[in-house]
């Protein structure tokens, strides 16, 4: 039984066609000032509800969104628990959405769905709110429910395509857009599908396909009535973005001007146009203009993640292109605690250029793209090194987790298992042939390693000379008697990544144990010390180790994984932000090991992160294809081999 404000509500089925203009697919800011009312008794009748919806649609058509919202609020307030009012909640949610208040919109969509759980439109609307807030997994679930309830509704397929596009699943986005176009009943609505396809092609760097879709959308737009052009205004902003993505500055500005000529338009559409205008100014190298207009866009729709991301990127682009004199650029929508000031001066024969930038640190900027190197070794060339049950499987599961849950492109994740994971190949892909050649400054890079890790005392030559002994990661071909020559020095590893991988966002995850696993379930040997995270972190790096230096790391008795890796993956999905996920995982790992092994295992994080926390699940803002010239020089890895070829003994 559904609830509103903790009170159980009996649901009665009511089918009602909403006014077309209220169901437009725009997104979102404020509401309220007392206005028209209806009688309590008549408000409960279907005809009166329909009358309220028509009046609200009239206000909306004139751009009077607050008046429409007030009318709906006053009507709802007579009996908020009335099941027949689901359509009032839904319609008010769309008003909130167009005004820019995504959270309130989502709350109204939730209430509508509670009162009428059989209406697919409620799920589609809530999915739109989730997508606007950046929660794409929940958005996709709601879109799937909506399509299952009404598979012939074009707008459901269109909105799911939008979510897939944000998740970088471009083939599925294009397939849904084809389905949407085939179900459209009016020609002008097909402009949405063409515009959306143009953006998908632009995001996927298929620039030759952008302009045909933009032209098709504009041809439809030019044949529209004035009222239909108001409905189609969001499509113009999409087309402008598509042209910007392929570097067509003049074409982008043409569509911005065309969009601004349409009245009335919602706060949401206006904020999108302003964000793209900021981006256009950024392409011109106009830092101050890009910043000012971006702030205006964010002010209109502060909860809309897309607008914030575009506006922030606009300033970055402007900073990269600006020159000639001194400019001060404040990145939009940044808390004072995360602001850093940098000064860059360049000289040419004709001028000196100084750019003073006040803006977020590297980790506060959008993530352009994401790359990962994942290593797992369960068996070793040196037969005296004990085998591990799940290290190779942990690595394989983690690599698939990055692709399936964390929005990494499959070919952006390299997986080295067992014989593939020699010392030379690991170091080559970390410091030469892979990560240094693909990563850019605003990218996120992940290195995951699951194998043995030597205790510091194993470095006997250092101990004998009185030097501080080193920790080593054990590769497939490491020799226990020659760790310096054949192992991977942890200190060298982090310094190598700092110097050779050109990004300030590096996450290192070490599920590393010790040699000679004496216990069938423990990932350590005679000396129960683990990798010391104090030796591992470098500037711009976040390091997570599976246990404290005086504890063991355990493989589970409950499932075929290491305890640490399994709980880390679960926590990253549930908590999203890396630090929040670590805090949660720290407790769940300790609890399982205490219950099953009567022992302690406490994961450790060493954080020298430059800027705010980041979500491993974050969508890359400017994903790039894997450079063919780099790919052709890499040996096959286990992400590209067949399942049979990549399987390993357990």
Image: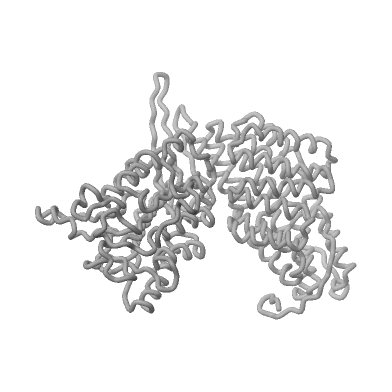
Q: Residue at x 84, y 74 (%)?
A: 40
- The colour scheme is one colour
Is 303 left or right of 228, judged from the image as shown? left
Q: Residue furthest right?
A: 47
Q: Residue at x 75, y 72 (%)?
A: 115
Q: Between residues 4 and 482, which one lies in front from this camera angle? A: 482
Q: Residue furthest left?
A: 465
- Asked if 39 appears above or below 97 in the picture, the reply is below
Q: Between residues 403 and 13, which one lies in front from this camera angle? A: 403
- Asked if 130 appears above or below 204 in the picture, the reply is below
Q: Is residue 399 visible?
A: yes
Q: Residue at x 73, y 35 (%)?
A: 258
Quadrant where the C terminus is found in the figure: bottom left
Image location (x, y in percent) of residue 95: 73, 57
Q: Is residue 342 visible?
A: no
Image location (x, y in percent) of residue 601: 33, 70
Occupied quadrant, residue 86: bottom right
The image shows a total of numbered marks equal to 0
Q: Between residues 85 and 646, which one lies in front from this camera angle? A: 646
Q: Between residues 532 and 27, which one lies in front from this camera angle? A: 532
Image location (x, y in percent) of residue 522: 32, 69
Occupied quadrant, residue 217: top right
Quadrant where the N terminus is found in the figure: bottom right
Image location (x, y in percent) of residue 487: 25, 51
């Amino acid at each position: 039984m559904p609830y509103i404000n903790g009170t159980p509500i009996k649901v009665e089925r009511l089918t009602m066609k909403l006014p077309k203009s209220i169901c437009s697919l725009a997104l979102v800011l404020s509401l309220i000032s007392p206005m028209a009312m209806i009688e309590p008794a008549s408000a409960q009748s279907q005809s009166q509800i329909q009358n309220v919806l028509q009046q609200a649609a009239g206000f909306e058509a004139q751009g009077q969104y607050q008046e429409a919202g007030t009318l709906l609020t006053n009507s709802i307030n007579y009996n908020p628990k009335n099941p027949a009012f689901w359509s009032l909640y839904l319609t008010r949610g769309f008003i909130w959405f167009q005004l820019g208040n995504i959270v309130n919109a989502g709350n109204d969509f939730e209430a509508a769905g509670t009162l009428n759980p059989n209406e697919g439109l409620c799920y589609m609307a809530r999915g739109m709110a989730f997508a606007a807030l950046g929660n794409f997994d929940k958005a996709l679930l709601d879109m799937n429910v909506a399509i299952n309830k009404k598979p012939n509704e074009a707008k459901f397929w269109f909105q799911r395509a939008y979510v897939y596009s944000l998740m970088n699943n471009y083939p599925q986005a294009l397939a849904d857009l084809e389905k949407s176009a085939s179900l459209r009943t009016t020609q002008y609505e097909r402009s949405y599908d063409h515009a959306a396809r143009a953006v998908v092609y632009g995001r996927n760097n298929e620039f030759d396909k952008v302009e045909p879709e933009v032209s098709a959308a504009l041809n439809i737009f030019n044949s529209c009535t004035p009222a239909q052009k108001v409905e189609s205004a969001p499509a113009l902003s999409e087309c402008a973005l598509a042209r910007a993505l392929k570097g067509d500055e003049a074409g982008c500005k043409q569509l911005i001007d065309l969009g601004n000529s349409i009245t009335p338009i919602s706060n949401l559409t206006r904020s999108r146009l302003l964000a793209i205008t900021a981006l256009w100014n950024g392409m011109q190298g106009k830092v101050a203009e890009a910043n000012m207009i971006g702030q205006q866009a964010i002010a209109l729709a502060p909860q809309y993640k897309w607008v914030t991301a575009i506006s922030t990127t606009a300033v970055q682009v402007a900073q990269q292109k600006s020159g000639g004199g001194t400019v001060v650029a404040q990145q939009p929508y940044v808390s004072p605690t995360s602001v850093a000031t940098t000064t860059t001066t360049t000289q040419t024969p004709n001028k000196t250029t100084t750019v003073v930038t006040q803006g977020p640190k590297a980790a506060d900027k959008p993530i352009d793209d994401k790359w990962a190197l994942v290593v797992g070794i369960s068996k070793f060339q040196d037969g005296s090194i004990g085998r591990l049950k799940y290290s190779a499987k942990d690595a394989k599961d983690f690599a698939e987790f990055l692709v399936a849950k964390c929005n990494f492109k499959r070919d952006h994740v390299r997986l080295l298992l067992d014989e593939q994971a020699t010392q030379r190949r690991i170091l080559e892909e970390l410091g030469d042939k892979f990560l240094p050649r693909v990563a850019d400054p605003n990218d996120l890079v992940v290195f995951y390693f699951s194998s043995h890790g030597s205790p510091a005392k194993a470095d006997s030559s250092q101990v004998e000379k009185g030097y501080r002994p080193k920790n080593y990661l054990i590769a497939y071909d490491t020799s226990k008697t020659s760790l310096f020559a054949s192992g991977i020095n942890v200190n060298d590893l982090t310094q190598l990544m700092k110097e050779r991988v050109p990004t300030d966002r590096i996450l290192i995850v070490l599920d590393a144990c010790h040699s000679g696993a004496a216990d069938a379930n423990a990932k350590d040997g005679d000396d129960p010390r683990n990798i010391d995270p104090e030796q591992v972190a470098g500037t711009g790096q976040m390091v997570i180790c599976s246990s404290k230096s005086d504890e063991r790391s355990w493989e589970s008795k409950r499932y075929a994984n290491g305890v640490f890796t399994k709980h880390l993956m679960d926590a990253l999905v549930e908590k999203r932000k890396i630090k929040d996920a670590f805090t949660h995982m720290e407790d769940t790992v300790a609890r399982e090991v205490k219950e099953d092994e009567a022992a302690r295992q406490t994961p450790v994080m060493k954080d020298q992160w430059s800027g705010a926390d980041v979500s491993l699940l974050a969508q890359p803002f400017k994903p790039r294809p894997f450079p063919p010239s780099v790919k052709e020089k890499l040996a096959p890895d286990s992400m590209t081999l067949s399942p049979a070829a990549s399987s390993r003994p357990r």
